[in-house]
Image (tube, rainbow, N blue to C red):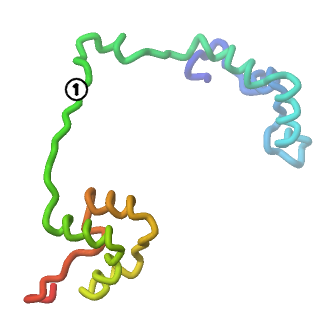
Amino acid sequence: LNFVNPQIFDDLSVFQSWFGFKDIGQKTRGGTDETSIIIEERKNQTVTKLHEILRPFLLRRIKLDVLSEMPPKKEVIVYSGISKLQAGYADLIDKGTLRDTLIAQGIENGRTLSQTNKLMNHRKNINHPFLFGEPIDPASGV
């Protein structure tokens, strides 16, 4: 706050006296602890006072006021088909056999797959199907 306005916020002890904080965190010298700060806040509405003091120093702007030549948002929806792998996973999700098929193919990530929520598995399949585990090429084993 001293950086914002050094004429008003020039002394920490004065600022602490405005709000009743004496040596915050100092337990040995009779300092202010958390419970007394909360009680003082409820009694004197310290946060409300602080907001009133700081309100003139806060700058709030709306984006359109600053960037008047900014074009409006434009939403573009791009449709794309799904791959053969995704179509196959979708069928297995519907049948409820995706986990067993992945394990049979040697994909270890299949063991952690939950089949209780088909909708989430469909979403995962469409957005990033390799979360189920990458398919293994039978010829190379990789």
Give the class, few, some or many, for how many residues have Cα within 10 Å of label 1's Cα (few <14, many ≥20).
few
Q: Nearer the viewer, residue 84 or 48?
A: 84
In the rendered image, which residue does mark 1 sit on? 74
Q: Position of residue 21 (x, y in %)?
A: 82, 31
Q: Nearer the viewer, residue 102 or 47?
A: 102
Q: In this rendering, would 112 be left or right of 59?
A: left
Q: Is residue 7 above or below residue 3?
A: above
In terms of image quadrants, where is residue 36?
top right
Residue located 72% across and 27% down the image: 12
Q: Residue furthest left?
A: 139
Q: In this rendering, would 83 be left or right of 132?
A: left
Q: Please tell me how many numbered marks the rendered image carries.
A: 1
Q: Is residue 45 above or below residue 100?
A: above
Q: In this rendering, would 79 be left or right of 116?
A: left
Q: Residue furthest front?
A: 95
Q: Is residue 60 above or below residue 27?
A: above
Amino acid of disc 1: Lys
Q: Position of residue 135 (x, y in %)?
A: 20, 78
Q: Position of residue 51 (x, y in %)?
A: 67, 19
Q: Is residue 4 above or below residue 135?
A: above
